[in-house]
Image (spheres, rainbow, N blue to C red):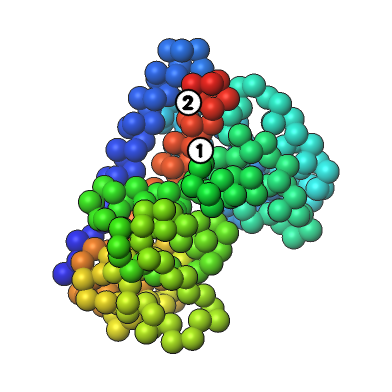
Amino acid sequence: MAVRIDGKAVSAKVREQVAQEVASLKAQGVCPGLAVIIVGDDPASKIYVNNKKKACQATGIYSEEYALPGDTSQKELLDLVADLNHKEDIHGILVQSPLPKGLDEKAVVEAIDPQKDVDAFHAYNVGKIMIGDYHFLPCTPAGIMELLKAYDIAVEGKQCVVIGRSNIVGKPMAMLLLHQNGTVTVCHSRTKNLAEITRQGDILVSAAGKSHFVTADMVKPGAVVIDVGMNRDENGKLCGDVDFDGVELVASYITPVPGGVGPMTIAMLLKNTVTAAKLQNDLL
Ligand code: GUN
């Protein structure tokens, strides 16, 4: 039976560290500030943004929320980003994804000052990650690396299999595992013989976005299984990609949904905001 990785407990520790760093920065006259922009009224995005705001409050980070109507123009959004780029009390800017149809998300991300890009989505930061010389990491893959560290799970020399090749999770995840000397395979929707490949993974990370996608027969006995999925099952209940009850019997470690990777994502956003505040005040 696999050990359940407790993302809530690990994220609480990260938040505690963040709160201490915030206090120490404030003593030096710097209050880390995060601006979160949300456009339209996607219910899931509203919940995420609200959770981000609450997490900032709990750790002493100053936050501003910009809730813009769904018919906001590209120019209005770019003007807001430009204003925030110049605002001295704002160190991090996050534009909640997805944006309503008609808005060019890529152009908006590229308009963010790379030093304030706490999502690490800007091409400059993506390039920095690729060469292993970075200040910010995307929150979800960074949170997963933090979970592995917290449970003393070594990556070096391991076969790591990542399902999904998104810019937010799959690609940076592969890069971070590679930086830790894992041997990495990235699978995606066109991969042939998926189960054959996933069965080789000592560490299997699934970001497929499909419930019950990873079944026990796809998992190597003793593997570490990390579930990035945020799906709804047939009954509307939140669930991951992994068929938890079956895979739990085969894996050595497993992240539940909820309570696994999810809580880490916000904790890493707070950490990036503190890093951004230090970076912009020559305190790194
Ligand atoms: N939407 C879902 N996850 C994220 C995230 O990590 N950052 C942003 N900006 N939007 C998201």
Please indicate whether residue 11 sits to the left or right of residue 130 in the image.
left
x then y, percent, for residue 2: 19, 66
Would you say residue 83 is visible in this rendering?
yes
Q: Nearer the viewer, residue 124 or 262?
A: 124
Q: Residue furthest left?
A: 1
Q: With respect to residue 54, does 249 lie above or below?
A: below
Up-down relation of residue 179 to residue 206 (above or below): above
Please name the residue that numbered disc 1 is placed on. Answer: 135
> Label 1: few (<14), some or many (≥20) within 10 Å?
some
Image coordinates of residue 238 in percent, x first then y, are 42, 64
When asked about the image quadrant of residue 206, the answer is bottom left
Please tell me which residue is depicted at 51% across the width and 17% down the height of the picture. Answer: 30
User: CB under 8 Å between callouts 2 and 1?
Assistant: yes
The x and y percentages for residue 263 are: 38, 49
Q: Could you classify mark 2 by the number of other residues whose Cα lies within 10 Å: few (under 14), some (14-19), or many (20 or more)?
A: few
Ligand 1 near label 1 (Cβ, under 8 Å)?
no
Residue 258 visible at all: no
